[in-house]
Image (tube, rainbow, N blue to C red):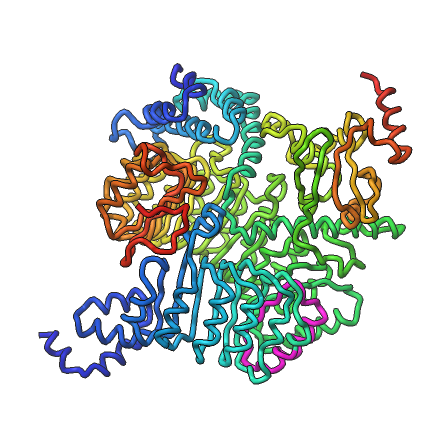
Amino acid sequence: MLRKKMNYFPDEVIEHVFDFITSHKDRNAVSLVCKSWYKIERMSRQRVFIGNCYAISPERVIARFPELKSLTLKGKPHFADFSLVPQDWGGILYPWIEAFAKRRVGLEELRLKRMVVSDESLELLSRSFGNFKALVLVSCEGFTTDGLAAVAANCRSLRELDLQENEVEDHKGNWISRFPESCTSLVSLNFACLKGDINLAALEKLVARSPNLKSLRLNRAVPLDVLQKILMRAPQLVDLGIGSFVHDPASDAYNKLKATILRCKSIRSLSGFLEVTPRCLQAIHPICHNLTSLNLSYAPGIHGNDLIKLIQHCRKLERLWILDCIGDKGLGVVASTCKELQELRVFPSDLQGGGNAAVTEEGLVAISAGCPKLHSLLYFCYQMTNAALITVAKNCSNFTRFRLCTLDPVKPDPVTMRPLDEGFGAIVQSCKRLRRLSLSGLLTDQVFLYIGMYAEQLEMLSIAFAGNSDKGMLYVLNGCKKLRKLEIRDCPFGDTALLTDVGKYETMRSLWMSSCEVTLGGCQTLAEDRPMLNVEIINEDGQIDFSADEKQKVGKMYLYRSLVGPRKDAPAFVRTL
Amino acid sequence: MSASGSVSTVSRDDNLVSSSEDSSCPDDSDLQLGLGLSLGGGGAGNSAFKLQQQASFGAQYATSLTAKNFPSSSSFSSSSSSLGKPSHASCAKRSADSVANAYSSQVVGWPPIRAYRMNNITNQAKSVATDEYNSMIEKNKRKNGVVENTTNGSNKNYGTGKTKTSLFVKVNMDGIPIGRKVDLSTHSCYETLAQTLEDMFLRPTINVTGISIQEHDTRVEATRSLKLLDGMSDFVLTYEDKEGDWMLVGDVPWGMFLTSVKRLRIMRTSEATGLGPRIQESSGRQRNKPI
């Protein structure tokens, strides 16, 4: 009855309804209702998210979504961030640009994470899509400032150029002078990760002719006096990343800056301070009151009392990224000042000495007590206790992301010398909306029992140096129904765990296992049983002999579901079984 | 008892079997939610397994840890009671901590920080060092220097933060055909550089017992090993400066050294003649030093 009624609506009406459905999950669900809806949905879909670039081919994406305007692509597995994936593993952008250019896709936005982006691909991109508006590159590599120059020169409608934590070869920044005089549409420009010099005059002129500029993140090469001139031109900025903040506090330039900053009443997000004279920070205090986001994780020059004073002005902070030199006491100040805090990330500042500057469980407990809205945490600490985690779980049951990293990966609770099973168990039991979890410290199979039992919404789990037996992994695979990404390193999980429920992996995006107990035979069995999975063995030092003994342990395995079979660009050291 | 005795000596595979026997409960019904002692064995067995796993990072590491940390039985409850003895606990804790610090710096990809950020930590260490040097100069210049709380530069200090990303120089040691490279930007003083070079050339295998006696305070650990800097050994550390001259390391302030060093050489003291009066002094010191 209902279906008959729905058929009375012309397609245009249904399409209009679908315009209001924006989340990828919802649109995917809608497309499964019936053939008619599938067709309407695919013809009207403009934004496509592809979590694993090897799960599908560009041709098939275009065939299904011809009206595609915005593409998000992720390449290498997450552990590539930590040097666990060799160079040249893959994740190459060029074939996508080539295919899209050939089919004349009206691409306007491209967001990439952990992909290899060559200058050629950037040049092709810049010449192929006349309406291209936004390029966001996160943790990518393979390009130089020449590629950026091409984008600047050719993308006439460019609104957003956002480079976050990429490894870019810097050919001495004249790329910024390649933005034509006619380019006045910039809304967001972030080049903080570039290491080299930049043409300062060209930068100033660019800012001057960009009235819509809301977000600007500078690199280290932009000195304080130029910052002042830029802020004069762009008092409407909402998000500012300061490059160099070094000057004589007694100088004219500094005083000018102080006055200019007072005009920037819209700044809500602040980052950078890649080099800083602490005495100059007073200039920033007037805008701290309105800040909702503060990222000082690349500013080791701000610490001690200067850091505390700064934070004490930031009562409206919702997101804070800092270095562990803030110390437990500093976190106490955060806890008593930042009552609106939702996301906290504490990064390590010193990997050699340890102990001195790091934070401990005390800081985290203070934060949990003072910041009831906290739901996202990344915390690198010297040590953690079960008692602290249990307290945190009681104080904050809203966590959606909880990532804890003890600097010693197998450190037990230092007070009781017990594993941290109970602490993490309390977290998963209390935080019913937990979607992402990373564990560390001494951990046994018990913690995985808890996770399997309580972490019903868990989508991503990262495990290292934990567990005693296959049981650990099995608890997780059996219990976490919504699991999408599982990454494991240095755990005693073997073939039994891998092969008990092979169908599970087709409900997930990917599984990474390195330095575990899985064998070549186990992986081969899995690959044969599930043709929809690509089971890749990374054999970088040639240790594995694929024709020989099945009982060889596999150093690195990455498996993922795919609609297009084994990839054709795999390097010699990657074998898809 | 015998299980733990075997832990320290069995191979990795066997240990997997024995630790899973230790750690897993007799039957699943014993897996309780809560601080159940039934999983006690899991603790020690688990740690012991991990230590064996970590054996790949240096045999000495594994054996020294298992000897010190897990002297008694495999069941966790009994080892925790033995840890109750204060001296034992602190000994175990300290060696675990110091080994842990060594551990975390030797494990690939740990702590899990994006490579981009990791590189920044290294570079920032150098910029702090440069600022320390400059603040040192400022303090020396002014009579009543106001000592800032922060280590990062003094009032009048600006424009000094410009740092290069890394400063790798070649290091050769007399008698060793293959040279090394060291990144000077990761050091802030001569002492840590000398320590690193010693570890590179004089102790090429990962010797954790050497590391384990270090305190966290790098200053303290540095003063214990000035063999290359004070002329007390057969070797002395020299560098080639921009003008092509070979100089003794340690005479000029660190920052100045960084700007003029081109490469390093660990030279036999006997060959280090003509490098200045200091050599005669140090040989004299050697003779006079009581044994």
Does residue A23 belong to the magenta stretch?
no
Residue A569, quarter of the rendered image: bottom left
Give above or below for B79 relative to A158.
above
Q: Position of residue B182 (x, y in %)?
A: 67, 42
Residue A418 in sight = yes
User: Where A409 falls versus A38 (above or below)?
Assistant: above
Q: Where is residue A261 in the image (x, y as percent from the top left)?
A: 66, 73
Q: B149 left or right of A471?
A: right
State the extent of the magenta-drawn residues as a range.
Answer: A205-234
Residue B207 image offset from top left, x and y in percent: 59, 27
Looking at the image, residue B112 sits to the left or right of residue A561; the answer is right
User: How many labels were placed on the picture?
Assistant: 0
Q: In this view, does B5 lie to the left or right of A276?
A: left
Residue A364: where, in percent of width, then height?
51, 47
Q: Does the magenta stretch include residue A210?
A: yes
Q: State the quadrant of the C terminus of chain A.
A: top left
Q: In this view, does B278 lie to the left or right of A196?
A: right
Residue occupying the far top of the picture: B2
Q: Nearer the viewer, residue A405 or A315?
A: A405
Q: Is residue A317 above or below residue A17?
A: above
* Foreground residue among A205 and A63: A63
